[in-house]
Amino acid sequence: MVAFLFQSCKSSGVNKQTVEFKGKKVDIQNSGVGTIHITMECTSLKARNSGVGKLILSGTADQTEINSSGVNKIDATESNKF
């Protein structure tokens, strides 16, 4: 993992992304038919999923804000397992 203070990841249309993040804040936006799989170790996570996209979250975040609209899936079963 690479350490950053802040990272933003945006996905729209039809695509697939895998992101590893270690740092302070991460902001994820997924729309369309895309899939984002993020492994994180951060203090703040903000994730938005809309359309038919799929968002897979694993790792830890001290504060989380997750918003979903449309027919999509958010899988956070591998998040914040201490």
Image (cartoon, rainbow, N blue to C red):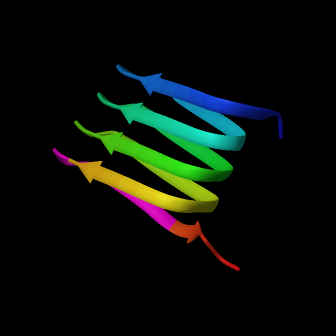
The residue under the point 60% across, 71% down is 80
- On the picture, is 79 further left or further right than 66? right
In depth, the one of 76 and 4 nearer the eye is: 4
Snapshot quadrant of residue 73:
bottom left
Residue 19 belongs to magenta span: no
In depth, the one of 56 and 24 nearer the eye is: 24
Where is residue 4? Give x, y as percent: 73, 31
The residue under the point 65% across, 51% down is 42
User: Can residue 32 be seen?
Assistant: yes
The residue under the point 36% across, 54% down is 65
In depth, the one of 19 and 51 nearer the eye is: 19
Q: Residue furthest right?
A: 1
Numbered-mark total? 0
Q: Residue furthest left?
A: 70
Q: Quarter holding the N terminus? A: top right
Where is residue 37? Give x, y as percent: 58, 44
The residue under the point 64% across, 36% down is 18
- On the picture, is 68 further left or further right than 28? left
Q: Residue furthest top?
A: 13
Compared to residue 41, the image places residue 11 above or below, namely above
* Magenta stretch in the rendered image: 69-76
- On the picture, is 20 further left or further right than 62? right
User: Can residue 15 be seen?
Assistant: no
Q: Quarter holding the C terminus? A: bottom right
Where is residue 66? Give x, y as percent: 34, 53
Compared to residue 11, the image places residue 75 above or below, namely below
Where is residue 43? Give x, y as percent: 60, 53
In depth, the one of 35 and 27 nearer the eye is: 27
